Image (spheres, helix red, strand yellow):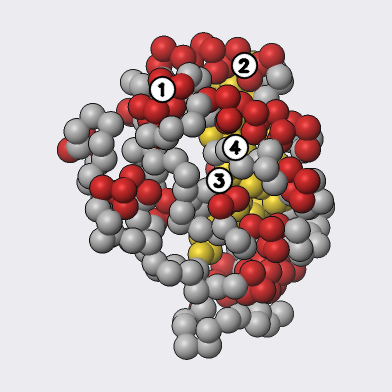
Amino acid sequence: MALQLPSADLDWTALRNFAMLRGQLRVSLTPKCNEKCWFCHNEGDVPPPFTHLNRDARPREREMTAGDFLNVLGGLVDAGLERVYFTGGEPLLSPLARPVLTQLPDRGPDATYTLITNGTLVRRHQEWLSTTALDKVKISLHYFSDESLKAIASVRFGIATILDGIEAARETFERVELNTLVQRENEHELHDILTYALERRLSVRAVHRAGGHRLQCRPEGLRDRRPGHHQPPAHPDQRRGGGGLRGRAGAPDLPDRRHRDRGHPS
């Protein structure tokens, strides 16, 4: 099958080859975000905290339209792509979010569409989000108080905004999961985060950045992913490689947080 891709002057060979891998694709709708989390990688573009400190470091301008995204997605899904993740930045800040997410191509029974969001705008967009073909929403919950939210994301709004977004997602979608990056700013709140999740039967993917150990908390219990601990076979999306799709080229590498002042990435 031939993919009709935008911008004929670009080399789309890798994307055409990727269409046959039946793996996963991350679609960055925007590099912009209303949070400035120090650990943000922004899908390879300039992270919001870096832009906040250096106004000359700007993400690349968007090159793809909503029609471009939908055209490429349709071709890849028809070719067998199984998992698509819509990310950012904060994807719901993008003017592309509504036209793309409400017109997602039909996919087979094994394919899924997932929105990855910080939750702050879910309530605002709940009405049109309810009309989409999204299978799952994953919400970042790296904090559980106004204090830790400010320390990690450098924002002025409170944790209630994010918790309300989680509730709006639960009202709208059958599958809602949480992502939590374990760090010194939230270690004292992990019990509260897990309790909140378990009370609502929400799965949590908790990643410990130091050493790369992972804990996965699901309603049926906690899975320890440290070396030496027996685990069930990996989920297919952990065994297969993934790709990315965005309307921008990559950004320069940023220094590790070990070389930054506490709470102020550079």
Q: Which residue is mark 2?
A: 196
Circle 2: residue type: Tyr
Q: Secondary structure at mark 4?
A: loop
**Image position, residue 151 (x, y; %):** 35, 27
Residue with the mark numbered 3: 239
Which quadrant of the structure image shows residue 15?
Answer: bottom right
The residue tagged with tag 2: helix, strand or loop? helix
Q: Helix or strand or loop: what does disc 3 sit on?
A: helix
Q: Amino acid at mark 3?
A: Arg
The quadrant the N terminus occupies is bottom right
Location of residue 262 with respect to 132 vertically, above or below: above
**Mark-to-mark CA distance, 4 and 3:** 28 Å
Query: For the residues carrying marks 2 and 4, which lies nearer the camera in this image?
Result: 4
The residue that disc 4 covers is: 119
Q: Where residue 107 sits: x, y (%)?
A: 78, 59
| Residue drawn at the location 64% of the way across and 47% of the way down | 115
Q: Residue at horizontal 81%, vertical 51%?
A: 131
**Mark 1 Cα shell of 10 Å, populated few (<14), some (14-19), many (≥20):** many
